Structures are given as structure tokens and as C-alpha cells.
Image: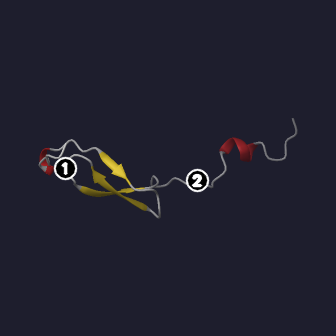
Amino acid sequence: MDKKINDENCVHHWVLDQPNGPLSAALCKLCGGKEEFPNSLAGSNWTKPSATASSNKGKTV
């Protein structure tokens, strides 16, 4: 698969670098195109406790 495909017509197959910061670099296996993708969704907070965990705080089962 040495043939390069025109970037405009490519159905990209992105290979992403390991997460390191807010963005990861990506390279298309088919056309060699380069792109950056976010490593998290806007507004998401991985450290925020869930609503269930905070509502059960102090309760005994």
C-alpha cells in the first residue's frame, strides 16, 4: 500500500500518538495527512465524583 491517496478524497484511517497533554498528533495511514485530536471532551472532568457517590456519603448500608 505504497500508493498515496489525494488528501481531499481520502477516507482517513488515523493513527494517534499516545496521550501527552491536551492534544494528540495523528497521521493517516492512507494519505499521510496530519491532524491533532483532543484527549478529552470539553466539560468532562475525570476527577469529579459521581452523583451516586456523593449522595451516599455518610450513609451506612
Tell which residue pokes out farthest to the right in this image: 60
Give the label, 2 or 1, closer to the camera: 1
Q: Would you place residue 51 above or below residue 34 in this image?
A: above
Task: Determine crowd level at label 2: few under 14, some 14-19, many 20+ residues with C-alpha closer than 10 A.
Answer: few
Under mark 2, the amino acid is: Trp
Under mark 1, the amino acid is: Cys
The quarter in which the N terminus is drawn is: top left
Q: Which residue has dot 1 on it?
A: 31
Asked whether, in this view, residue 1 is left or right of residue 39, the answer is: left
Nearest the eye: 16 or 36: 16
Tell which residue pokes out farthest to the top in this image: 61
Tell which residue pokes out farthest to the front in this image: 2
| x then y, percent, for residue 43 | 49, 55
Asked whether, in this view, residue 4 is left or right of residue 42, the answer is: left
The quarter in which the C terminus is drawn is: top right
In this rendering, the count of numbered labels is: 2
The residue at the point 56 percent across, 55 percent down is: 45
The residue at the point 47 percent across, 54 percent down is: 40
Q: Which residue has dot 2 on it?
A: 46
Task: Determine crowd level at label 1: few under 14, some 14-19, many 20+ residues with C-alpha closer than 10 A.
Answer: many
Find residue 53 and report its image quarter. top right
Nearest the eye: 3 or 56: 3
